[in-house]
Image (cartoon, rainbow, N blue to C red):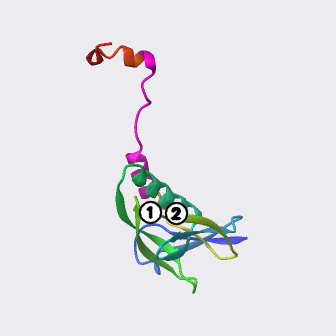
Amino acid sequence: MAEILSITAAPDPGTARTLCETDRRILKVLSNRNGSYVTGTALADAVFRYGFALAELGRIDTIEFPVITADGVAVRLQITVGLFADVNIAEHPTEDAELLDEATTAHLVAKADGLARAGEPFTPDEVRELPWLGW
């Protein structure tokens, strides 16, 4: 079984690691115009989701999340996501530890959810009932 590398907050990545077991043997690689970065599956999905939500609104943001270096060390990385800050995502089969950072993942998902457009579009009947349209 593969190991899971878990970072519980945003502290020094060298001191906040714990290991447990899982069947998952796939990490994800995030790529942008500056490079490619191996990170956990949930982290990569959260980064991508937040970047997509920002892009839909024409906004950008700089975020920080953990990645795994070529030496297998977990470090924190800052990248820009959102409009014109393309981020691609790919699976990375590996025997390496799965990288988890539940606090960062939850934070990015919450930020993405906060940007989601609320509500449904009006139906044609609802539009006809709007008094200011004068129909």
For image coordinates 29% across by 18% down, the residue present is 133
For image coordinates 58% across by 83% down, the residue present is 72
- Residue 126 percent across, percent down from the top left: 40, 17
Describe the element under mark 1 as helix, strand or loop.
helix
Disc 2 to disc 1, C-alpha distance: 8 Å
Q: Is 112 located above or below residue 92 in the figure?
A: above
Residue holding disc 2: 43
Q: Residues within 10 Å of mark 1 (few under 14, many from 20)?
A: many
Residue holding disc 1: 104
Q: Is 127 located above or below residue 92 in the figure?
A: above
Observer-nearest of 92 and 13: 92
For image coordinates 47% across by 67% down, the residue present is 8
Q: Amino acid at mark 1?
A: Thr
Question: Residue 78: within the magenta?
Answer: no
User: Which mark sits nearer the N-terminus, 2 or 1?
Assistant: 2
For image coordinates 50% across by 59% down, the residue present is 48
| Residue 45 figure quarter | bottom right
- The residue sitting at the front extreme is 135
In-image side of 8 versus 40 (left or right): left
Question: Residue 120: within the magenta?
Answer: yes
Report the number of discs: 2
Quadrant into which the N terminus falls:
bottom right
Observer-nearest of 32 and 74: 32
- The residue sitting at the left extreme is 132
Q: Residues within 10 Å of mark 2 (few under 14, many from 20)?
A: many
- For the magenta stretch, what is the residue range? 107-125
Q: Amino acid at mark 2?
A: Leu
In-image side of 56 versus 40 (left or right): left
- Residue 60 percent across, percent down from the top left: 36, 60
| Residue 26 figure quarter | bottom right
Q: Are marks 2 and 1 in contact (CB under 8 Å)?
A: yes
